[in-house]
Amino acid sequence: MGLEEVEGMNPLARKLQRLGRVSEEDVQHVLALPAIVKAVPTGHYLVREGRPATECCVLLSGFACRHKLAATGARQIVSFHLPGDLLDLQHLLLSVADHNVQTITEAVVAWVPMAAIRKLTAQSQAISDALWRDTLIDASIFREWVLNVGRRDAKTRIAHMLCEFAARCESAGLGSASAFELPMTQEQIADATGLTSVHVNRMLRALEADGAIARDRRHIRIADWQNMRSIADFDPAYLHAA
Amino acid sequence: MGLEEVEGMNPLARKLQRLGRVSEEDVQHVLALPAIVKAVPTGHYLVREGRPATECCVLLSGFACRHKLAATGARQIVSFHLPGDLLDLQHLLLSVADHNVQTITEAVVAWVPMAAIRKLTAQSQAISDALWRDTLIDASIFREWVLNVGRRDAKTRIAHMLCEFAARCESAGLGSASAFELPMTQEQIADATGLTSVHVNRMLRALEADGAIARDRRHIRIADWQNMRSIADFDPAYLHAA
DNA sequence: CGTGACGTTGAGAACACTCAAAAAAAGTGG
DNA sequence: CCACTTTTTTTGAGTGTTCTCAACGTCACG
């Protein structure tokens, strides 16, 4: 089964179109890449630190996170991933993985041989640019996370993470930024923000008490987005979405 | 004055050779790029957040840092840069800067028009790969910084920063990793590690008291590198230097 | 209806922060 | 080269945000 046979609007095609001036023909070339599509369960490792990668994993549905471990065993999530995301473009040019990628929900992924992608990037400047641009946007998000974890207090930090997730979901066509479902546990939010799950819990309730968000289970509503932006110190410029 | 006229072994040429299979001819093409070389003082801004960038800045001598500001005014340094580093390759494909770049010492920089670089990357796959690879390594370092700031305690965090800086200096040919000069103030170390300068001072003295490092002003000696690696939780794999 | 994962709450401890001030070093100008 | 200023480093005392440990509640699922 190939990428072009994925049901519904292909999230990868959508993402490519967002990334730049990629022609319809180029998108077709990408979707024609040889791929093995698989359904994987929650918690499944897609990339392992220290392992060489010869295939590129595309997330077609579900959510994933990228994480690293400290010597103490503490885990730091360095990014979350949505349908359409290319999960290891790094390995197009870096031979060994420096982090793990793991699903946080059930997911459907496509495995594409690196060699096939390299061939395509050599042929099409537009595709090469789009993929490079994608890795640059990832890097921009990492920079923002360094700031988030390094210089914001717990409440702001969590609010920022929520804003970013909401904005990215909306821009990926997964629904509205003002009402969405969180796929991650509070412990995963903790690992992403450099806090403990206990403190994440307290701060989520504090955000709720402040009226910044409304919660029902994992469902989040942001009634006043301008207010939330200000509480979260969130300026979406770093997402380079436009 | 062009890049090829820089005195001594050109740090950019050295870096390109480290980045991949770039032929002597390709290196010459890079050095032949039109460039305006300038000496700039300490604290000079090379890139400003929010500004579009049409030129790429190459650091030829001296040191620089990349930083972002939180709404509270707190500053987070997200990376340090050494001679040979390309300071805004991001802007090859992202039109607006999402962070600042500022010198932390006197420096000499070369300004190269983006258009000229784009032309070169379109012509040579090897150069394009080398530059893309450089941005991917930057991203890997950002990921490590998220972990460093998010999940390591203050002493480990500072030790890690020192190890990284030492390793990068050595690999850039600026001297030995076991004895080097720090170009940054303790306040800048604080901004890079998400701490206060007061606490950085205490932790540096603690590292000294532990025998992990020896200091004289900004000069650092690491007698037992294996010990320091272990204290710092430092594994250089993420630098993808090999 | 049991079991395990996830979320919630409380009490006490700790790591890092704030404020403040002095000492040392590095620039600056006469 | 010395007096002066500014920046950087160092030290102390008290505070607070976040952590740790521990327990209990709740929900999903078999």
Image (cartoon, coloured by chain):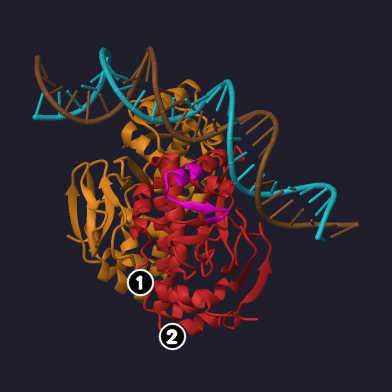
Chain colours: A orange, B red, C brown, D cyan
Q: Which mark is residue B24?
A: 2
Q: Quick one: label 2, few (<14), some, or many (20+) residues within 10 Å?
A: few
x, y percentage for residue A194? Answer: 40, 38
Q: Nearer the viewer, residue B210 or B135?
A: B210
Element carrying mark 1: helix
A43 in magenta: no
Q: In this orientation, does residue A111 appear?
A: yes
x, y percentage for residue A76? Answer: 35, 43
Name the residue located 52 percent from the left edge and 67 percent from the top edge. Answer: B86
Look at the picture and state if B172 lies above or below C12.
below
Count of all numbered marks drawn on residues in the image? 2
Look at the picture and state if B18 lies above or below C27.
below
B212 in magenta: yes
Name the residue located 52 percent from the left edge and 42 percent from the top edge. Answer: B200
Quarter of the picture containing the N terminus of chain B is: bottom right
In this rendering, position of residue A187 left or right of residue A144: left
Q: Amino acid at mark 2?
A: Glu
Q: Nearer the viewer, residue A223 or C13?
A: C13
Task: Identify residue for label 1.
Answer: A121
In this rendering, position of residue A227 left or right of residue D20: right
Quarter of the picture containing the C terminus of chain B is: bottom left
- The magenta stretch is B203-219
Name the residue located 53 percent from the left edge and 36 percent from the top edge. Answer: A229
